[in-house]
Image (tube, helix red, strand yellow):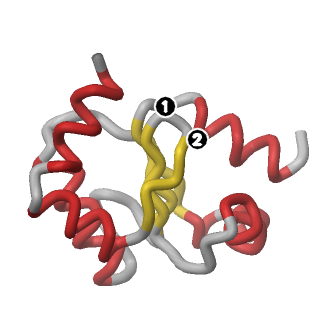
Amino acid sequence: MDVMDRIDEAVKGHSVFLFMKGTPQFPSCGFSSRTVEALKKCEKEFGYCNVLADQEIFQNLPRYADWPTFPQVYINGELIGGCDITLEMFEKGELKKMIDEASA
């Protein structure tokens, strides 16, 4: 399976998926850490991929959704955005609502 298929499978195989630097337990950058905290506060499980542990994904993910930075949050297979957009949605109550609807 090529890398784009692996990315697609990860994104579509979870209602909420996060490509991040590090893991939810040990984020490797502040942006990933803040994004994980917002997702955890929504109280739903989410899948994740540590892009630092998979160079193919690290190099090709920006092409997948035409989004150049990490982290990347996907809900129901659609790119929501990175840290800033995710935090803004969380503070407005939109992120939890979207995640709850995706998990229903």
Q: Residue at x 35, y 39 (%)?
A: 46
* Residue 11 found in image quarter: top right
Query: Label 2: few (<14), some or many (≥20) within 10 Å?
Result: many
Measure how far apart labels 1 and 2 are at the Cα level. Answer: 6 Å
Secondary structure state at the residue bearing disc 1: loop
Q: Are marks 1 and 2 in contact (CB under 8 Å)?
A: yes
* Residue 32 found in image quarter: bottom left
* In the depicted structure, whether residue 48 falls above or below residue 104: below
Q: Residue at x 70, y 48 (%)?
A: 7
Instruction: Determine which of the numbered discs, if any, sits on residue 14 in the image.
Output: 1
Query: Label 1: few (<14), some or many (≥20) within 10 Å?
Result: some
Q: Residue furthest top?
A: 104
Residue 61 placement, left or right of 78: right
Instruction: Determine which of the numbered discs, if any, sits on residue 48 in the image.
Output: none
Residue type, label 1: His
Secondary structure state at the residue bearing disc 2: helix
* In the depicted structure, whether residue 25 falls above or below residue 11: below
Residue type, label 2: Val
Quadrant of the image containing the N terminus: top right
Residue 24 x, y percent position in the rendering: 31, 57
Residue 90 placement, left or right of 23: left
Residue 22 x, y percent position in the rendering: 43, 68
Instruction: Determine which of the numbered discs, if any, sits on residue 11 in the image.
Output: 2
Q: Residue furthest right?
A: 2
* Residue 62 found in image quarter: bottom right
